[in-house]
Image (cartoon, helix red, strand yellow):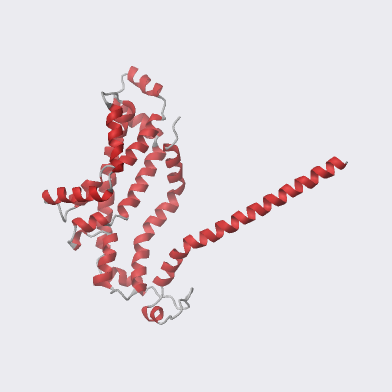
Amino acid sequence: MDNQDNFDRIEKQAKRRKAVKNAVIYVFLGIWGLMVLFPFYWMILSSVKSYSAYSSEYVPKFFTLSPTMQNYADAFTAVPLGKYFANTLIFTLCTTLLMMVVIILAAFAFARMEFRGKNIVFALFLSLMMIPNELVIITNYVTITDLGLRNTFTGLILPSVTSVFYIYLLKENFEAIPEELYKAAKVDGTSDFKYLVRVMLPISQPTLVTIVILKVIECWNSYVWPRLVTDDQNYFLVSNGIQEIRENGFGRENIPAMMAAVVVISLPLIVLFLIFRKKIMAGVSRGGTKG
């Protein structure tokens, strides 16, 4: 009986310690979540305040009793924000499509095809990740300028149609597929391209979806390169349009209107991530696990 009482007491203490530990973890995560989400809340709150109300606040208020949607209307009238959206959509779709073709073929070649010096070539290929991005941008800028492709969609798209990291990620995923399937397909007379399309791509769908989503986010947020190769408003993207909005749209002092434009530009990416967040996490973890 004493042993049973001691066991029950130890079990209760263990449960109590676990409950305290979970409570501390949840409190910490809650505080951390509020810190992460607060900038988004402040952005949305500022976007529904009128310019006069925002300017009259000597002490910032964390709520408003008179929200307005006029700032959102101004976001599409002060500057051609709709055209910036269309340009960004064209840039994102074309860049992502071309990049997927390039990285799929490259990853398949490194994962399944045999050729002399493959490992050395791949090692040199990975070494490109060590080159500072600033040097790549300078080289790409000189090349695009010499080709006369500034202020064109071609000049915007070409430097972004490949990625060493995505090729590596997809190669690791392809190599996780049993090689016996490839040998069996070759015995049946299946071509490499047909095996890639009918076997490897369906199996690697989670990783492919992840890469597409990450590339879409990367293209949507692209700022430095479009800013370098475009000074024509007809080719501005939404990220570059923010600077145009600030300089020639609302003015530097109209923060609520600026926040409304930022909300409009950020909303598609937020929705995209919320919808596909599980696929992104699953694809990255699956692509990085070999076996």
Q: Quadrant of residue 53?
A: bottom left
Residue 155 sits above or below residue 100 on the image: below
* Residue drawn at point x = 19 percent, y = 48 percent: 139
Q: Quadrant of residue 127?
A: top left
Q: Quadrant of residue 44?
A: bottom left
Who is closer to the viewer here, 161 or 204? 161
**Residue 289 in view of the camera:** yes
Relative image position of residue 80 (x, y in whole percent): 24, 66
**Residue 78 in view of the camera:** no
* Residue drawn at point x = 32 percent, y = 37 percent: 167
Residue 167 sits above or below residue 33 on the image: above
Relative image position of residue 86 (x, y in whole percent): 26, 57
Left or right: where does residue 11 sit relative to residue 158? right
Residue 199 sits above or below residue 84 on the image: above
Image mark count:
0
Relative image position of residue 240 (x, y in whole percent): 26, 61
Q: Residue furthest top?
A: 187
User: Quadrant location of the N terminus?
Assistant: top right
Q: Residue furthest right?
A: 1
* Residue drawn at point x = 28 percent, y = 40 percent: 128
Residue 236 sits above or below residue 192 on the image: below
User: Quadrant location of the C terminus?
Assistant: top left
Left or right: where does residue 138 sit relative to residue 188? left
Relative image position of residue 102 (x, y in whole percent): 26, 38
Left or right: where does residue 183 sit relative to residue 14? left
